[in-house]
Amino acid sequence: MILITRFAIELESSSKFFETREGVEWFNHRLSFFKKTCLPSILNQETRPDLWVIFITKNKNLHNQLFNETFAFDFIKIVEIERFTTFKEIVTAFLLEYNLSQSITTRLDCDDALFPEYFKTVKSISDKTSSDCLFEPTKGLSLQIEDDTITRAAYIQKLLPPFLSFINRTGVNIHVFSFNHDEWPKVFITEKQNKTPLWIQIVHENNISNQFGWGWMVKSVVEINPGKIQYLFKTLDVVKKSSFKLIKANFRHYLYLIQGKFYKKTRNRISFKIGKD
């Protein structure tokens, strides 16, 4: 099993973002989250991946800082990217170079985390399948973190989350980054898991692509007391929520869900009428 993480990668070939003060501050902030959330979540896996590949832009300062946090763990490999290309091509080239195309690949952002049972679950599914298969764990946890404190926590159901694994049995040139996480073709056999939370998506001030709870392809949100999951991140503090506040929050989530379903149903009816005319 191979875990793949993008850490600090320039978006364009001419970009020098990580040589600027803003880029260095961004990296330091992400490295702080990586140490407190992402890294310990992998070290605490019941079944660890065989290899964790962390891709990073070629930059001596960034590499040294990341190396200082990971050198003690021999299953972690830092790979510097020397020339700009799509990340899909970067991963493909790496797997071909090391003859790892026929492997299980998993994706994880550097500021997110996985529940301890994640890779144990993937291995269990892998042991039972002989075909190429996409593992889609739809249940996870949304966390809002401010100043080293978990201020909100909620279990969510999210289709095609950015925590997928691809089990490659045929050796074809396909891995977990072959498609955007929410654009996988339906032709692939998919193994869904929606009973046990297996991933943790973290919302913080420097992560503008995610929001707490509701978001793209999220089907349900159930807010919980952050203290219930503090055992996962022992270095973080938590804001304890009263039962009344949680009931109030979940009532709002329920209204949001009903409103969304009503809107979708009404929109479908309008589309049907327009079609008939």
Image (cartoon, grey):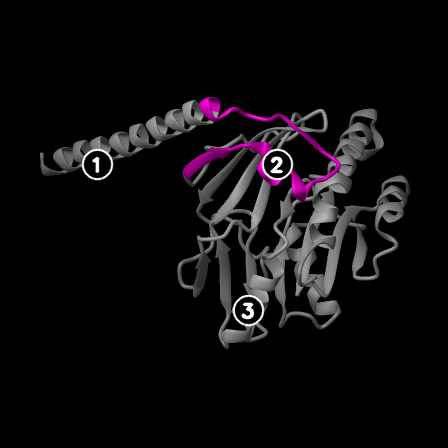
Distance from label 3 to label 1 (Cα)? 40 Å
| Amino acid marked by disc 1 | Asn
- Which residue position holds label 3? 124
Using the image, determine if residue 237 lies above or below residue 118: above
Residue toward you, 255 or 82: 255
Question: Is mark 1 in CB contact (under 8 Å) with mark 2?
Answer: no
Circle 1 — which element? helix
* Circle 1 residues within 10 Å: few <14, some 14–19, many ≥20: few
- Which residue position holds label 1? 268
| Residue 269 spot, x, y in % from top left | 17, 34
What span is in magenta? 220-245
Question: Which mark, residue 113?
Answer: none
Circle 2 — which element? strand
Q: Nearer the viewer, mark 1 or mark 2?
A: 2
| Residue 136 spot, x, y in % from top left | 49, 56
| Amino acid marked by disc 2 | Ile
Q: Quadrant of the N terminus?
A: bottom right
Distance from label 1 to label 2 (Cα)? 34 Å
Question: Is mark 2 in CB contact (under 8 Å) with mark 3?
Answer: no
